[in-house]
Image: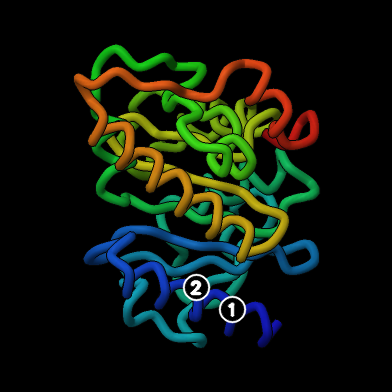
Amino acid sequence: MNGERDAIIAAARSLFGRGLTHGSTGNLSVRVGEHILVTPTGSSLGTVEVDELSLIDRSGAHVGGPKPSKEAFLHAALLRARPAANAVVHTHSTYAAAVSCMDGLDPDDALPPLTAYFAMRVGRLPLLPYFAPGDQRLEPAAEEMARTHSALLLSNHGPIVAGASLGAALDAIEELEETAKLFLLLQGLPTRPLTPEQRRALDPRPGNN
């Protein structure tokens, strides 16, 4: 489990250092056997330490270490929904959070496929309804949507992504943030997203998008 702990801390420092999280926002998790390691409540990803990580079970119940993030139930929900996933990353990154506050988004596909890498690493991005942070009524909606989508956008909140590895989840959430940035930069300008055929050719395997 020490390797997984070290990987979480390295990923946390990377996210914080590159401005993808701020203050005490954002949380990460990694599946470890029948349990899940997750960052603790009230922690900054810039300062959290290995011995401060929390351990929860697959239902989201706290089983060891400090008190987990109040959003740990979301990590458990995504990992239950996606048995092939082993890590979850959630941020309040600026551009994705900004998009999550916009009116008129397609709830089934909140960001257009502006780049091939977005189509490959994220696929479709459904927008979930607003719930206050920590509101567990979000759990069933997130779990259901995660069965067919590896990335979700939480309204007025931010993105959450599951990946086969922590590295894959990090790559996907960074690609999502960059696409959100492009989407906002291009507001009011004509755009040329990938065609449906181009998008289908890049889609992850069925059930992994």
Q: Can residue 114 be seen in this view?
A: yes
Amino acid residing under circle 2: Ala
Report which residue position mark 1 lands on. Answer: 7
Classify mark 1: residues with Cα within 10 Å, few (<14), some (14-19) or many (20+).
Answer: some
Residues under numbered marks 1 and 2 in contact, where contact means CB atoms less than 8 Å apart = yes
**175 vs 63, nearest the viewer:** 175
Q: Is residue 127 visible?
A: no
Amino acid residing under circle 1: Ala
**8 vs 137, nearest the viewer:** 8
| Position of residue 201 measured from the top left corner of the image (x, y, whole percent) | 73, 28
Q: Is residue 91 left or right of residue 79?
A: left
- Which residue is painted at 47% across and 23% down in the image? 193
| Position of residue 33 measured from the top left corner of the image (x, y, whole percent) | 80, 66
**140 vs 84, nearest the viewer:** 84
Vertical order, 105 against 88 (above or below): above
- Which residue is painted at 71% across and 38% down in the image? 81
**Mark 2: which secondary structure?**
helix
Q: In this view, does 59 lie to the left or right of 192?
A: right
Picture quadrant where residue 132 is located: top left
Q: In this view, does 206 lie to the left or right of 22?
A: right
- Label 1 to label 2, Cα distance in Å? 6 Å
Q: In this view, does 10 lie to the left or right of 155?
A: right
**Labelled disc at residue 11:** 2
